[in-house]
């Protein structure tokens, strides 16, 4: 146990970092519009598949693919929001909740069905880089590089939310929708941009995911559940909370997987989700 | 339609459904049985989801607990009534245990927690191999039980509809609508909201559990995805929403529509069943979030919505 601890911790932190990118996305989407976006996990899957295609068919490196996936999925998210979410946005909260579940569930089912019909087995990208030896411990340099990218992207999202006009608008809407409206925040525009940013971040997480782990068409909804667990754990619209929630989940999964066996690591997310909601109905940091 | 006309229509439908197995193929009876199962789940979901206004995405957890509770006892060669009693009691007790903490949550958070519950149950069922047989499945004593399962579920559905109509007209139904509209106001008028909510959730769980117990007895083989899977978890809820949540006719309309669509797609097209299903969900979400049964066209045709 003790000898394996560093690699368990690093594995957990990296997994948490990959969760974090998608969790930021869902956190601001849920915070701004209260959409239960069931298709969020499928976005990561699609980001992973696009990366796989770019790497295997176009010969790009995953890092080049990263910068193609990010803007492309921003546009896809904007389009999705304009076509499917905006038309239902004017309904009463309860109706909107139901309609948003129906619509995003429909997207999720269609996406996973079409992708599973066009591929026979889970895909993965191999991108070998030399391992680093630090203080007698072996570190995969791909993982460390990814961790750095995740940190950089987290910083960028933080600056976007804190410093830009649009980012402030997003935070204002999350804090107080009516208040934001009163001071002139363009809510439809903020909602659309939020959906685009959230989708792009999640797809980018897919690029990293497909290099580390296989991506398969049916991973969408379980992944959405994990994201929802993280968002609930961290509090809605709270970047630090989402990051902490992701790390807690990543580490807990890694530890439980090691001590109880891999088949139990999946239960951690759902157990945490239910348990934390019951103790703190508005999230651990919310 | 007036009240007697509606009662006559319901009686006629019941008679037709009761007589049908004597005239049609086994294939069609199987289809009807599975459709009735979804109706029972959709209607029992709707007690909490439609009438109480709490979006319970975890109805499949109760269905699956019922199926496994009955299944485990049957596989240990206990008599059928004991197994069915367990299929009712286990999910009801489970619901009673989770009701108080879960009802502290509202809106999307309640939906989330209940959705997580199904995933948790599926994972528990596959990991607790000693009890459930794990991912390899649980075998029940074999036998052809299509006919008894069909009639049991038909009786169950008839009872559910009777209870729904009766509750809607009673003071209890008024309390449910009060809680849905404004829980605090209902409380101010002397409704013990928590007690009502708990009772409704337990009743809903008991019905879903019985449906699961009968299903397990019929199918004779249980696997975690077969009872806790996404289609089982969301199908009935989507049916209730599609038909019209909070109405008596809604779950029937939705279940009939979606079951037929799904079967036709499966038989005629073969591929892309879930894609078509997904597109239907998107269209319903965009254009009919209140459901088919609440569409104004019925009011024009019959003078009153079947909902009313």
Image (spheres, coloured by chain):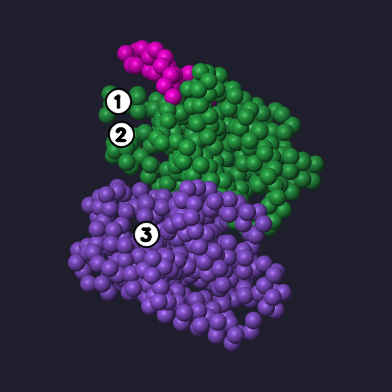
Chain colours: A green, B purple
Q: Residue at x 70, y 50 (%)?
A: A87
Q: Is residue A143 magenta?
A: yes
Numbered tag placed on residue A278 in the rendering: none
> Mark 1, residues whose alpha carbon is within 10 Å: few (<14), some, or many (≥20)?
few
> Mark 3, residues whose alpha carbon is within 10 Å: few (<14), some, or many (≥20)?
many
Would residue A34 be found to the left or right of residue A90 on screen?
A: left
Cβ atoms under marks 1 and 3 closer than 8 Å: no
* Quarter of the image where one finds residue B30: bottom left
Identify residue for label 1: A4
Q: Which residues are magenta?
A: A125-150
Q: Nearer the viewer, residue B145 or B96?
A: B145
What is the secondary structure assignment of the residue under circle 2?
helix
Badge 2 or badge 1: first in the primary sequence: 1
Identify residue for label 3: B64
Labels 3 and 2 share a subunit: no
* Cα–Cα span, label 3 and label 2: 29 Å
Tell me which chain the residue with mark 1 is part of. A
Task: Indicate the position of residue A21 as horizontal and vertical percent values.
Answer: 54, 32
* Quarter of the image where one finds residue B53: bottom right
* Cα–Cα span, label 1 and label 3: 38 Å
Cβ atoms under marks 2 and 1 closer than 8 Å: yes
Q: Is residue B225 visible?
A: yes
Q: Residue at x 24, y 62 (%)?
A: B140
Task: Indicate the position of residue B159 as horizontal and vertical percent values.
Answer: 45, 78
What is the secondary structure assignment of the residue under circle 3?
helix
Q: Is residue B88 visible?
A: no
Would residue A39 be found to the left or right of residue B2 on screen?
A: left
Identify residue for label 2: A258
């Amino acid at each position: 146990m003790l000898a394996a601890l560093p690699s368990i911790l690093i594995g957990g932190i990296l997994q948490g970092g990959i969760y974090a990118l998608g969790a930021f996305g869902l956190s601001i989407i849920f915070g701004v519009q209260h959409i239960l976006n069931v298709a969020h996990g499928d976005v990561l899957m699609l980001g992973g598949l696009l990366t796989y295609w770019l790497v295997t068919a176009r010969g790009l490196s995953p890092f080049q693919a990263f910068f193609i996936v990010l803007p492309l999925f921003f546009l896809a998210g904007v389009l999705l929001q304009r076509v499917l979410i905006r038309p239902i946005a004017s309904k009463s909260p309860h109706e909107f909740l139901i309609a948003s579940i129906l619509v995003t569930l429909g997207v999720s089912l269609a996406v996973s069905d079409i992708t599973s019909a066009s591929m026979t087995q889970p895909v993965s990208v191999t991108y070998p880089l030399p391992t680093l030896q630090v203080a007698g411990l072996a570190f995969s340099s791909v993982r460390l590089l990814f961790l750095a990218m995740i940190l950089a992207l987290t910083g960028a999202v933080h600056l976007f939310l804190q410093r830009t006009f649009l980012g402030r608008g997003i935070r204002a809407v999350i804090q107080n929708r009516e208040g934001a409206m009163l001071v002139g925040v363009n809510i439809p525009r903020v909602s659309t941009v939020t959906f685009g940013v959230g989708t792009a971040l999640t797809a980018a997480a897919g690029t990293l995911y497909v290099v580390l782990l296989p991506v398969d068409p049916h991973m969408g909804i379980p992944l959405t559940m994990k994201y929802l667990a993280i968002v609930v754990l961290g509090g809605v619209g709270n970047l630090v909370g989402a990051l902490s929630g992701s790390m807690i989940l990543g580490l807990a999964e890694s530890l439980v997987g090691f001590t109880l066996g891999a088949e139990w690591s999946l239960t951690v997310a759902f157990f945490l989700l239910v348990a934390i909601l019951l103790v703190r109905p508005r999230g651990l940091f919310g | 339609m007036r009240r007697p006309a509606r009662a006559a229509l319901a009686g006629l439908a019941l008679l037709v459904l009761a007589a049908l197995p004597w005239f049609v193929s086994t294939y069609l009876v199987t289809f009807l049985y599975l459709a009735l199962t979804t109706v029972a789940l959709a209607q029992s979901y709707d007690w909490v989801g439609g009438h109480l206004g709490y979006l319970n995405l975890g109805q499949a957890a109760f269905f699956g607990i019922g199926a496994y509770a009955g299944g485990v006892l049957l596989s240990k060669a206990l008599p059928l009534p004991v197994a069915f009693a367990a299929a009712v009691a286990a999910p009801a007790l489970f619901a009673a245990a989770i009701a108080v903490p879960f009802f502290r949550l509202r809106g999307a958070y309640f939906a989330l927690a209940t959705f997580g519950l199904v995933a948790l149950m599926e994972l528990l069922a596959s990991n607790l191999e000693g009890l459930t047989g794990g991912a390899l499945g649980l075998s029940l004593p074999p036998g052809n039980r299509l006919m008894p399962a069909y009639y049991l579920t038909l009786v169950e559905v008839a009872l559910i509809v009777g209870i729904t109509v009766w509750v809607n007209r009673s003071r209890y139904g008024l309390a449910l609508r009060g809680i849905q509209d404004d829980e605090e106001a209902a409380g101010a008028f002397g409704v013990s909201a928590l007690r009502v909510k708990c009772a409704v959730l337990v009743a809903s769980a008991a019905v879903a559990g019985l449906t699961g117990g009968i299903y397990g007895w019929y199918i004779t083989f249980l696997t975690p995805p077969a009872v806790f899977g996404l289609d089982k978890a969301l199908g009935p809820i989507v049916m209730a929403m599609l038909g019209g949540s909070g109405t008596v006719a809604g779950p029937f309309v939705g279940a009939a529509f979606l079951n037929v669509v799904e079967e036709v797609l499966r038989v005629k097209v073969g591929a892309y069943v879930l894609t078509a299903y997904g597109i239907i969900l998107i269209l319903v979400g965009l254009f009919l979030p209140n459901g088919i049964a609440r569409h104004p066209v019925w009011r024009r045709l019959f003078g009153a919505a079947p909902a009313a």
